[in-house]
Amino acid sequence: MVWGVVQFPGSCDERDAVHACGLAGEARLIWHEERALGGVDAVVIPGGFSYGDYLRAGAIARFSRAMEAVAEFAAGGGPVLGICNGFQVLCEAGLLPGALLRNENLRFVCRQVDLIADGARQSPFLREIEPGERLSIPVKHGEGRYYAPEEMLDEIEANGQVAFRYAPGQNPNGSLRDVAGVLNEGGNVLGLMPHPEHAVDPLTGSVDGLKLFSAASSALANA
Amino acid sequence: MDRHSLPRPGAAGVVSRHRELGLTDAEFELIVEKLGREPNDVELAMFSLLWSEHCAYKHSRKLLRRLPTEGERVVMGPGENAGAVDVGGGYAVAFKVESHNHPSAVEPFQGAATGVGGILRDVFALGARPIAILDSLRFGELDSPRSRFLLDGAVRGIGHYGNSIGVATVGGEIYFERPYEHNCLINAMCVGLAKREEMVRAAATGVGNAVVLMGAATGRDGIGGASVLASAELGEGDDAKRPTVQIGDPFEESKLLECCLELLEQGLLVSLQDLGAAGLTSSAAEMASAGKVGIDLDVTKVPLRETDMEPFEIMVSESQERMLCVVEPANVPAVLVLCEKWQTGAAEIGTVTDSGQIRVLRDGEPVGEMPVEALVDGCPLYELDPAEPAGWIYRNRATLDPDAAPADTLLALLASPNVASKRWAFEQYDSVVGSRTARRPESADAAVLALPEAGNAIAIAIDGNGRRVACDPYAGTVEAVLECAQNLACVGAEPLGLTNCLNFGNPEKPVPAWQLERAVSGLADACEALGVPVVGGNVSLYNEGPEGPIYPTPVVAMVGELPDARLARSSAFLREGDAIALLGPFAPSLAGSQLAKLRGELDAGLPQPDTEAVARACALLRDAIRAGRISSAHDVSDGGLACAIAESAIAAGLGCRVDLQPLRERGCTPDEALFGEGSGGFLISGEREVLVELGGVVLGRVGSGAIELVAGERRVSVTLADVKRSWLSLRHLASPDRSE
């Protein structure tokens, strides 16, 4: 099992993502100018401020060569996990529904929050998580308010594409319907604002995020 | 070189121009003497910056010679871009704290952001990857709209830069006091980790080597920042100084950081230096001075973001996100290729020479030539003319009735901005990036970062209560050092080194001069007593407003080592039934305390701390923590024992019953026992026998639901919900839209 972590100029959490993936397989960085993913089994688009995020979060990264390759990989059913800025990039690239807007209070927020697994459809990342299960994972972002038009929200809920919601009273950014993470229709692409790669060691917070990585790893091993 | 080929001084009154640039007549005469002629405009601009207080430390350098700088763990000491200490396993930790006070008082968001950017560059200039940021902030009282504006901008600016570049902001402190109303303090600290063998110094060496400028293009921003902003008092018309504040671009710095670290990893650089105050002028001069060489720079080769810039503007521009490096000629192509990979600018702009001169060229023609020695070490150093003031020179303002009930007094203290939770601020900072943060802000007395590479961990603390230093500059500064040491002891860490930023008023006036002299004495004595070397520092003078000088504010930061981050204790009580004890030579007094402030009773004078006894208590606690013998540890600081107890209870969601009779028996009044402050007190919890064996004085037990304190006839009984509400009184500051 080999993970590829895409690194853009301005990525911040790529080394943390490599560390987390390394606990559930091997991991290596993929430079943003690479057009091929080099045969990796799963891809992580990490957190950070790709290309400075000056235009709009994720808006420039979606045009990178590596993202062309990631889009092809995802279309072929390859597992793709977008975390924070990676979630923003995947939404900008049209691989996930909706958009991430500035936090409701217009301030960056870094906080440990509880997520509730929503009982979403099949996804390689969610196989070890029961519907309704609570996970303690940190958020840290300035643009994490999940937004989609009402009809689209209804549709992704009906499709079982909501992967995680913030626990009641813990929505840190004003996300509509408390949505913290969503899947594509195929379930192989997951985007979420909280950082599972920062929840893989009791020393630095919790280990609840590790489940996403180990689930994908065992899903591929069994495939 | 033919001196006559240099452009001549401007005909119309160079003599008055030097005053505009902040040089005295005597200093100007000295420059003429050292050059053997009058300086031209380029040279005068460069001298005025390097001979400014900010660059030359001309009022503080003599005092700073008193600080102990030697230690067996010291890898780099004062004089380098940052200090560094050995943490074992082949690794070193580099750290520095620096002020960005005056820019932030003019434009808080960019001032604070570029303060963070600047201190990051100081650390990665050594080849260390930045792993943590801390900040120490001072503002006027929150009832002032100006203070709220500065606070909001500064907190957002720190977050903007640190979050975007992916370095965790793991701790800090904020105080609110009237004397900072006009002149806020923004001190930022960066800690970096480096393999010892990959570290690099700033000294330019190797005659014939190339000088390469990397990073952002050079513009007109920040021209004269060091002399105009940093070396004079603020006053009316500061809005007009806004163009001297630089604009930060964390994305540019992120690329520059990764590029520099990769260049060093590949062994492509001879030396590296950041461009900070005074831009190219100071970095080139300092690199040449450290290497005892000369440097020729051609300003036409500097990539510009504006057209028609004059040579002097290019030489003094403080455009951000730039680094200067020395490269062997054969390696220049490889350096340029790597810079292109990281999409960061790079241009070969000069050469290392054996002339001992800084030569500024335009299209190969000299437009300025100055001896490096005259630029860097030629500035006269001044003796201070200190005088102790007759008494308390700052104003008092009572906001709390001295007859308030003890419970109301406790709630008022917890709600006062200096004591109240700073969660609203630190939640705006990414504290987890890097996967090292073992103790996040407010969960322990010091930040704790795991170093899996070196097989151990470090703890970092930053302290400096200016109000107490104002009461007694000597004792207050000793206390700041001791508080850092106590914070480290609470997580089981042993101090390795100390850095500091001395924020004071105008050193040409007798009272700030006296404050500075006494504070440096206190710093030197405390560091000597603890055996902690000073590995670096920064001085920010002329911090005054219309009402006079700021509180004298030495901000002290200490880095310590602990064998395993998992051993660090939290400041929160752990479990019901644990005993609570006071450890250490704590002799509380109301002098200089937060309560004295609220009651409007501040006055000159503090009790002198017993440094040796505090050091012994720190060692005792450190060993007990490392042995896993106690449940929690918290040092007694602002608001005294009652506030320390409340903080440990709130963090745990547990209550307690405590009787302060042992302090009463030591002669403390009830107020002193509850709310008195001073060095040397630790609030610890754990098994009763263990606490007693350590020499702790048992005061009570951890319980549930309520906090009950007894001090003679004074009794406090408050619910946990009430203390929590008071302690979170500043929560609204994170949502300014709804609060105002």
Image (tube, grey):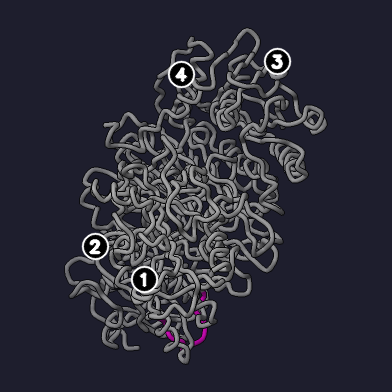
Specify the label residue B599 is tagged with. Answer: 4
Residue B231, can we see it?
A: no
Nearer to me, B516 or B267: B267
Mark 1 = which residue? A75
| Chain identity of mark 1 | A
Which quadrant holds residue A20? Answer: bottom right
- On whether disc 3 and disc 1 are found on a single subunit, the reply is no
On the rendered structure, is B6 left or right of B473? left
The answer to whether residue A220 is above or below residue B415 is below
- Mark 3 in CB contact with mark 4 (< 8 angstroms): no
Nearer to me, B309 or B165: B165
Q: Secondary structure at mark 4?
A: loop
- Mark 3 in CB contact with mark 1 (< 8 angstroms): no
**Does the magenta segment cover residue B205?**
yes
Mark 2 = which residue? B17
Mark 3 = which residue? B661
- The region drawn magenta spans B203-212
**Does the magenta segment cover residue B492?**
no
